[in-house]
Amino acid sequence: MNINAHAVKAQSLTKNFAGLKAVNNVSINVPEGEIFGLIGPDGAGKTTLLRMLAGIMTPDSGEGFICGHSTIREQTEIKNKLAYMSQKFGLYQDLTVYENIKLYADLYGVKHSGLDKHIDNLLDFSYMRPFKDRRAGKLSGGMKQKLQLICALVHKPKVLLLDEPTNGVDPVSRRDFWRILYDLSADGVTIIVSTAYLDEAERCSEVALMNNGAIYAEGSPQDVIKDSNINILSIKTHTPKTDIAEIRTILPENDVHIFGDSIRVNALDREKTASLLKNKCDFIKSITNERPNLEDIFMSVQKYEDNTAHLLTLASEGIKKKTGSSVSTNSITKRFGSFTAVNSVSIDVKYGEIYGFLGPNGAGKSTTIKMLCGLLIPTEGEGSVAGCNINTETEKIKTNIGYMSQKFSLYEDLKIYENIDFYGGIYGLSGKQLTKRREWALELSGLTERKRELTANLTGGWRQRLALACAILHSPSIVFLDEPTSGADPASRRLFWDIIGSLASSGVTVFVSTHYMEEAEYCDRLALIFRGNMIAEGTPEKLKTEYMQDSIINVKVEKPQLYIKEISKLPGVNNTALFGARLHVRTSSPEIAGSNIKNYFHNNNLPFESNKIPPSMEDVFVSLIDSAEGTDE
C-alpha cells in the first residue's frame, strides 16, 4: 500500500441551497488508512460534504475523488470501493442481524463463495455473534450502530464515510465502536468521520473544523490545538455550579463553563485573569493552567450565546416553587412478556434537584422515564410524580410535567410556530396566554426570525432547543429529559445545561438521562441502571470515591491507539481505553501496573508520560458496568 496516496480527495467542493453556501470551496486530501475527523457546529456543512464525497449529492462546483475515481463521472467504479453510513438508521427492523447483513451483501452484489465466512468474521470482529438471530428492531442503540457498520463493511470497502455514528451511544459501546475503527484503519481502510464528541475527534489522525460551510482549521489534533494560541485556566471551588455565575459576571467577554468538577476559563492573558479572579473571588480554592482541547477551539470560533443571561431568565418564568419529594417510587418493575426491562427500582427526587439517569443502551432508562411520565403502567410497584399516582392518575401526571423524548417528537411538516401552538393546545393554553408563551418559546429556542420555516429544515441542536421549549411551555414543576443533547454541538449542549441549571434554581425537578459523562457531573445526584437494575446512586463525588474501587493511570504517548492491546496485557492492568488523545489505564494495583507500563515503553524506546489521576465519570461508568457484567456472568 502506498501510504502517501490520497484515498479521498475534495477539490473546491461547493454546494448552495436557496442562495446559501452549505459548503463553500472545500478542499481536503486524506491518505490511505487514515482516520480523518470532521467537526463543527450544527449546520456547518459536514453532512453535505460527506454526501457529495459519497456521490449521492452533486456539487454545484468542484469535484470529489474516491480512490482516484470521480464522484461525478465514475460512480460505477466507486460503488464497491465506498461505504456511507448516514445519521439515520438504514436497517430493516423486522429482519434479524444476520438477515440484514445478507440483504446488504445482495444490494452490493457480493456473491463470492467465501461470503458466509466473511460474515462470520464480521460478527466476531464486532462482538455481535451472540445476537445474529435477534431482530434489528430489538437491538439497543449501540448494537444498531455496530450492525449498521457491519452492513457497510460487507463488500470490503476501501473508504468509509461515517456521519456522526456514535450519537446516542453509551460510553462502553463508543469505546467498542472506536476499537473497530482502529482495526479497520490498521488494515488500510480510509475513514472520514463527523462527530459531535470532540474527545473522539482528538483520536483522529487529522481533523478539519468547519463553520459556515468552510474549513477554518485543519491538521493533526495536536497541531490544531498548538496553533490556536488559546490559554485555559482550570478553577477549583467548593460549589462550582453556583460560583460560575459570579465568575461570568467578572469575565463577561470570556468563555466560562463547567468542565467536570471545575470551572474552565478561556483567558487571553492567563496571569492577569488569574490575579483578577483571586482578588475578587474568595471562594476559589485553586487556579491552574490547563491544556486546551478541541472543544475550546470550537467555542472560540462558534461564539457562545451573548444573551445567555436573558435566556435563563426566560426559562424560569412563571414557575412556582415547591418543596419536598417530586418523584418517588417503591420497587417499580416493568416486564414485556418474559423480559424484565426494569427491576424493582426505588428512587426519591426533591423539587429543585437535577437527577441524572445513566446506563448503557437498553439498560431500562427510557422505560423507567415512560413509567414516571404516565406513558407506561408498572407491572409491579408503586410511585408518585407531582403528587399523582403513577398507576392510577396517569392523565393527571401528564398535565403536571414536561417531557422531551429521546426521539424528535415534533411534527416536521408543521411550521415552527405551529408546533408550539399545537403543544400549547395540548397543555390547555389559549388566547393571550398562548400568544405570550409562543413568543417566549421562540425567543428561548432562538427561532423568532425563523418561526414560519418548516420544522423539518432545522438541524440537530436547533431541533433540540425547540423541543425543550415545547416541553416547558406550560411552566411545569417537573421536567423529564431523555437524552436531550444527543447529536447537539458543544455550544448547544452548554446552553441546554445552563437552562437546566436555571430551571433547577427556580425549584423545577429535572430528571435527565445522558450518554455524555461530562454532563453527568452537572447533576446533583446520579443513578446508574444496568439490565433493569439500579447498581449505584449518589452524588458524582460519591460515585467516584465510594463506588470506584480501581485507580486510573493517565498515559500520554504519540498514537496511543497503537498500544491499547499491549498495555491491556500487562500484569496489574484491568482495562485500557482511549480518553481523548491519551490512554486511561484502570488498575487495582497502581504500583505494579505503573511499573510495568514504564518498563514497556522504556524497552520499546518510546517517549511517554504517565501519572495517577482521579477517575473521570466515564471511567466510573465503564468500571461499574464491567463489574456488573462480571457479577451477572
Image: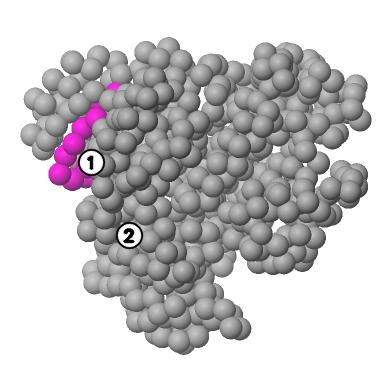
x and y, in percent, of residue 413 in the image: 72, 52
Q: Is residue 138 magenta?
A: no
x and y, in percent, of residue 10 in the image: 73, 18
Q: CA distance from mark 2 to mark 1?
A: 31 Å
x 28%, y 25%: residue: 290
Helix, strand or loop under label 1:
helix
- Depth check, front residue: 451 or 573: 573
User: In the displayed image of the protein, which residue is found farthest to the front?
Assistant: 603
Write the start and end of the magenta stretch as one range: 232-242
Residue under pointer 1: 591
- Depth check, front residue: 36 or 431: 36
x 63%, y 50%: residue: 126
> From the viewer's perspective, is the residue at label 2 or at label 1 nearer?
1
455 left or right, relative to 166 = right
Q: Is residue 474 in view from this perspective?
A: no
Against 226, residue 154 (above or below) is below
226 left or right, relative to 241 = right
The label shown at residue 128 is none
Q: Given the image, on which type of amino acid does mark 1 rest?
A: Glu
Q: Earlier in the sequence, mark 2 or mark 1?
A: 2
Helix, strand or loop under label 2:
strand
Graded by Cα atoms within 10 Å as few (under 14), some (14 to 19) or many (20 or more), the crowding at tag 1 reads few
x 39%, y 85%: residue: 382
Q: Is residue 13 in view from this perspective?
A: yes
| Residue 478 found in image quarter | bottom left
Task: Assess whether mark 1 and mark 2 are in contact (beta carbons under 8 angstroms).
Answer: no
Q: Given the image, on which type of amino acid does mark 2 rest?
A: Leu
x 50%, y 85%: residue: 379
x and y, in percent, of residue 475 in the image: 40, 60
Residue under pointer 2: 526
